[in-house]
Image (tube, rainbow, N blue to C red):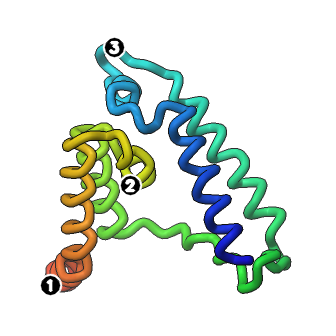
Amino acid sequence: MRLVFSILAGGLFGAGLFLSSMTDTDKVQGWLDVFGQWDPTLAFVMGGAILPMILAWRLTRGRKPLAGGDFPPPPAPRIGHRLVLGSVLFGMGWGLAGLCPGPAVASLGYGGAGGLVFMAAMLVGMRAAPAIGARIDRLAEAS
């Protein structure tokens, strides 16, 4: 049953990314071009994601998922060097490529060579992240 829910959720998520144009790199880069040809339409997509999530965190408090297990706890509201550096790197990659992980996976079927290169680079980055993070932690402790 859990697999069925996962497939349905993933399909719904991918369809939402496609319908909202989050897989269109030109649309995403237009959203990020605040001082040029800014395209504000993705603000509605982001608002349409943030608002239901706020509601979901409130509604799941003290409940159990239908498919078993537990809901994850809300993230800790702390800002550290890893969060700042990760946010900067994510933003740079998003601005340069016009893709982030979810839309990159959703666009694999039609994204061409650029989507495959992005996905390969993302996987290499994910593999290297623990070692790089540990080194950054050591440097932060030393200073």
Classify 10 Å Cα crowding around label 1: few (below 14), some (14-19), many (20 and above): few
Callouts 2 and 1 close, C-beta under 8 Å: no
- For mark 1, what is the residue? 142
Give the percent coordinates (x, y) of residue 19: 56, 33
| Badge 3: residue crowd in 10 Å (few <14, some 14–19, many ≥20) | few
Residue 94: percent from the left, percent from the top?
Answer: 31, 44
Q: Residue 82, percent across and down?
A: 31, 69
Q: Which of marks 2 and 1 is nearer the N terminus?
A: 2
Name the residue beneath numbered marker 2: 101
User: Where, by quadrant of the figure, is residue 127 drawn?
Assistant: bottom left
In the image, what residue occupies the spot 54% across and 48% down? 14
Report the amino acid beneath label 3. Answer: Gln
Q: For the N terminus, which image quadrant?
A: bottom right
Name the N-terminal-most of marks 3 and 2: 3
With 78 as the anchor, is 27 left or right in this view?
left
Residue 37 location (% of width, % of height) = 33, 14
Amino acid on which the number 2 mark rests in the picture: Pro
Disc ID at residue 37: 3
Q: Do the residues labelled 3 and 2 touch (CB within 8 Å)?
A: no
Q: Nearer the viewer, residue 105 or 142?
A: 105
Disc 3 from disc 2: Cα separation: 24 Å
Please indicate whether residue 46 sits to the left or right of residue 65 in the image: left
Distance from disc 2 to disc 1, alpha carbons, whole Å, reads 32 Å
Q: Residue at x 25, y 40 (%)?
A: 112
